[in-house]
């Protein structure tokens, strides 16, 4: 998928799903991806911290093919070489991963690049670098990332919400219990692990969150 298309999908689809085997209730990443795609999610990130390069490649290239068939944007976490090898549409890097400029140089102009941020300075840095989007969080405490930063400050939230030209997805403890609140604050993209992949019925979980978001949008 072309970078503009991936970006368009990012901007128009509120639900961004992150896959990782540790949290998918034993279903495995491939079966989980199938259920997430069937649920109509249009942006999927592969984030696997417990497998070898070859295992990740074998799995992620299959998921990338499934995503492409379904018109879903496929984003690889952390690793530029895996992203290139799998034909990912995007790469997501954190503050300790390869810097944006290297990722862009290695991956070329057509890949969507997202950068994780937690502070105002990190958002400013990502904007200055030219990132395509930022992940911003954690919004709430989360069990899904062991080395997660502290939750974002109110000041950083206010700053993030004024950066209208920078596509942003909020992450960390996001789910049906706080989505309407986040929507009303101004967030429009919600990146989630456990609220999607740790649910027994992924389709029902996604439908429920879409309903919450439509209601929040109607209420203005
Ligand atoms: N980055 C910041 S918080 C987080 C990541 C990858 C974990 C999000 O997981 P969950 O289950 O949606 O809180
Ligand atoms: Mg990373």
Image (cartoon, rainbow, N blue to C red):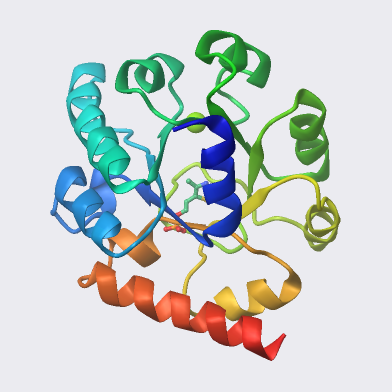
Residue 125, how many percent across, how many down?
79, 30
Q: Nearer the viewer, residue 150 or 171?
A: 171
| Placement of 65 over or under 207, stated as above or below | above
Query: Disc count in the image?
Result: 0
Asked which quadrant contains residue 218, the reply is bottom right
**Residue 126 found in image quarter:** top right
Residue 220 placement (x, y as % from top left): 72, 85
Q: Nearer the viewer, residue 217 or 50?
A: 217
Q: Position of residue 93 (x, y in %)?
A: 55, 29
Residue, x 17% and y 25% (percent of image)? 58
Q: Nearer the viewer, residue 117 or 83?
A: 83
Is residue 137 in view?
A: no
Quadrant containing the N terminus is top left
6 versus 175 height, above or below: above
Question: What's the residue at 66%, 35% (across, down)?
Answer: 132
Asked if one can make out residue 168 in the rendered structure from this viewpoint, the answer is: yes
Q: Residue drawn at (35%, 63%), measured in percent from left and top?
A: 196
Locate residue 39: give its quadrant. bottom left
In this orientation, which residue lies closer to the viewer: 69 or 11? 69
**Residue at figure coordinates x 65%, y 42% from the top left:** 134
Q: Is residue 163 left or right of residue 40?
A: right
Residue 144 in the image, given as x and y percentages of width and height: 40, 53
Is 204 drawn above or below residue 93 in the view shown?
below
């Amino acid at each position: 998928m072309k970078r503009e298309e991936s970006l368009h999908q990012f901007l128009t689809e509120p639900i961004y799903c992150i896959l990782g085997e540790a949290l998918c209730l034993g279903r495995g990443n491939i079966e989980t991806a199938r259920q997430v795609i069937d649920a109509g999610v249009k942006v999927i990130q592969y984030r696997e911290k417990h497998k070898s390069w070859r295992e990740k490649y074998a799995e992620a290239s299959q998921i990338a093919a499934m995503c492409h068939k379904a018109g879903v944007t496929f984003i690889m976490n952390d690793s530029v070489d895996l992203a290139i090898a799998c034909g990912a549409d995007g790469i997501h890097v954190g503050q300790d991963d390869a810097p944006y400029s290297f990722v862009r140089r290695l991956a070329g102009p057509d890949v969507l690049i997202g950068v994780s941020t937690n502070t105002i300075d990190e958002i400013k840095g990502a904007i200055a670098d030219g990132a395509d989007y930022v992940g911003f969080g954690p919004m709430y405490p989360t069990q899904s990332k062991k080395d997660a930063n502290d939750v974002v400050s109110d000041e950083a939230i206010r700053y993030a919400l004024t950066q209208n030209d920078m596509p942003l997805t909020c992450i960390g403890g996001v789910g049906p219990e706080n989505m309407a609140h986040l929507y009303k604050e101004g967030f429009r993209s919600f990146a989630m692990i456990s609220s999607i992949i740790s649910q027994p019925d992924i389709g029902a979980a996604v439908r429920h969150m879409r309903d919450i978001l439509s209601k929040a949008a109607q209420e203005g």
